[in-house]
Amino acid sequence: MSDRLVKLLNQLWLRASNKQRMPMLISRSHELKAGALCSVMLIAALSPGLALATLGEPEASVQSDVAQLQASFKATTPHTNFRVHEIQMPSGTALREYVSLDGNVFAVAWNGPYMPNLRQALGRYFDSYVAGAKLNHLDHNHLQILQPDLVVQARGHMRSFYGRAYLPLALPGGFNLGELQ
Amino acid sequence: MRRMTRVVGEGLGIALCLSALSCGGGSGKLAPPGPPPPPTGNNVVSVIVDEGPLPTTNATVNTLYTTITVCFPGSAVNCQTIDHIEVDTGSYGLRILAPVMNATLNLPVQLASSGNSLVECTQFVDGYSWGPVVLADVQIGGETAASLPIQSIGDPRFTTVPADCSGTGTAEDTVATFGANGILGIGPFELDCPVCETQVIAGTYYSCTSTTCTGTTASAASQVPNPVPKFAADNNGTIIQLPSVANAGAATLTGTLTFGIDTQSNNASGTETVLTVDDEAELTMVFNGTNWTQSFIDSGSNGIYFTDASISTCTTMGLTDFYCPGTNLTLPLTIQGANGVMTNNLTFLVGNAQTMLSNPAAANYGVFPLLAGTNPNPQSFDYGLAFFYSRRVATAIEGATTTAGTGPYVAF
């Protein structure tokens, strides 16, 4: 345990509890791979109450986001294999929701002076985000969560935040992550 | 005087390079000439980069700390000196983890305009810190600010976190999760939430009773401010000066934080490059032929974070967003201020994160100048604390006038 790398990783991503979590996550990913999109859509369809949330939810949830966040709808930008809805929050922060052609939100991105409500934006993935962020203390200005079913990457500093979250298993075919910003 | 010193410093640098048979990542280029000798005076406080307040369980890297003293307002005896307060040029305000404060300190809570308690949800990229705004007489080195609003993070008097605060991320309310006993936010602005003066912004300031909280506006005077403009003197900015460090790193690095710019003989401006920053405290870094317009120099970032797909990332689980090149890379960088001023031919070094962190000799290192990683923001180059190594970096507060220019700016 004298190795600095071990110390750092202990502090960051690979605490003892996480070592137990990792195999669990991986096995869950196999299940997800079998029918990720189906299960996402099925859960959404069976649980309309969940539609408050956005990531992994049907496109209609974008409208409830606007209401929940007391935000204004700014623009929809169509692309070949997805479209982007942009929401402007009163704080000046913008939230963009990426929707595949089959109508599901597969990614969200934000930038602006204050953090968006990620519980709203990440929906059922929020708890996973919080758990991942707890294992990720490096500095206060960057965050990366890499899980089979969820990726969150954020950077910035007080008064200027930037981040994105996406579902790797739900990305439209040929989607370039460079377009997610 | 400073020019003379720098020449001497360069000569020393050459001697060290020759004796070590390598310099600047093998490129043969000299490292920056290095800062002048550390200043002394009543406006100077010592700063250190080490493994943080919990080195065995929560060791930090490239994190700069200082020591402060807080007193109950008006009291000369009900005081406490607290070490390992992170020095952060990327945020605003003094915040202390409540568990490290003596119960007898019992700092009084700031009131919201409602007459209830003013409690803040401080947003960081990786989480939030919840706690009341309290008043304290603050002493840092020889500088003092009376009845300064500071935040008491994780204060047991306010344990119910509003949903739109906890909705911004994960809680960082303990020394272990925060990585410091507190944070001293001394960036180039005065306030952490200027828009909160007139607008209720979700996840920022709250008016709280003992059981419930509602979002509130907060006047500039009631917010948790950058302490520097609140000092009685030397209040227009700061200068952080750190010595050079070997590429492989070091256990600790000790330097100085000087308050004021051009207010005393030890903080005079010279011939440094003055780069103003925009209203997000950002400037442009030119790297790989691209203008990265949302870039910043930040003592609170513990690596050099930028994206270059041509540099290999590490394969070790947990380090995959850090760079692991085969050899140390020396890369060119130009920094351009909002005023259009550009630096001349800077270079920076990127090392192999896995190699440096696995080095048995580095088991207790807190300083890794070549630690660099990816940045998901394609328009941002985040040059962290390593920028301050071997430099004297001034940060002028917005609106402040020095002989070198008008803030907000950084100069080095």
Image: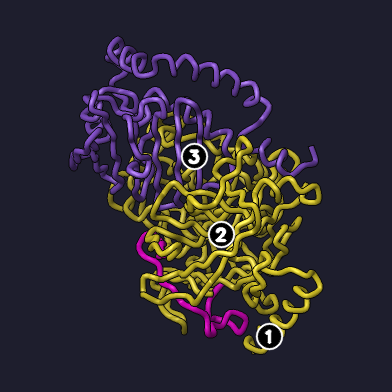
Amino acid type, label 2 = Ser
Q: Nearer the viewer, residue B319 or A10?
A: B319
A135 shown above or below B358: above
Instruction: Inspect this view and state whether residue A43 appears.
Output: yes
Percent of width and height locating residue B198: 28, 52
Q: Which residue is tagged 3?
A: B127
Q: Quick check: marks 1 and 3 in contact, CB under 8 Å?
A: no
Q: Nearer the viewer, residue A123 or B155?
A: A123
Q: Please give the chain letter of the residue carrying mark 1.
A: B
The question of residue B275 being in magenta is answered with yes
Q: Which residue is tagged 1?
A: B5
- Label 1 element class: helix
Q: Which of B363 and A63 is in front in this view?
A: B363
Chain A palette colour? purple
User: Distance of mark 2 from mark 3, alpha carbons?
Assistant: 18 Å
Q: Which residue is tagged 2?
A: B299
Instruction: Inspect this view and state whether residue B215 appears.
Output: no
- The disc label shown at residue A18, or none: none
A111 shown above or below B407: above
* Scheme by which the image is coloured: by chain
Question: What residue range appears in magenta?
Answer: B259-284
Nearer the N terminus, badge 1 or badge 2? 1
Q: Residue at x 64, y 47 (%)?
A: B181
Chain ID for yellow: B
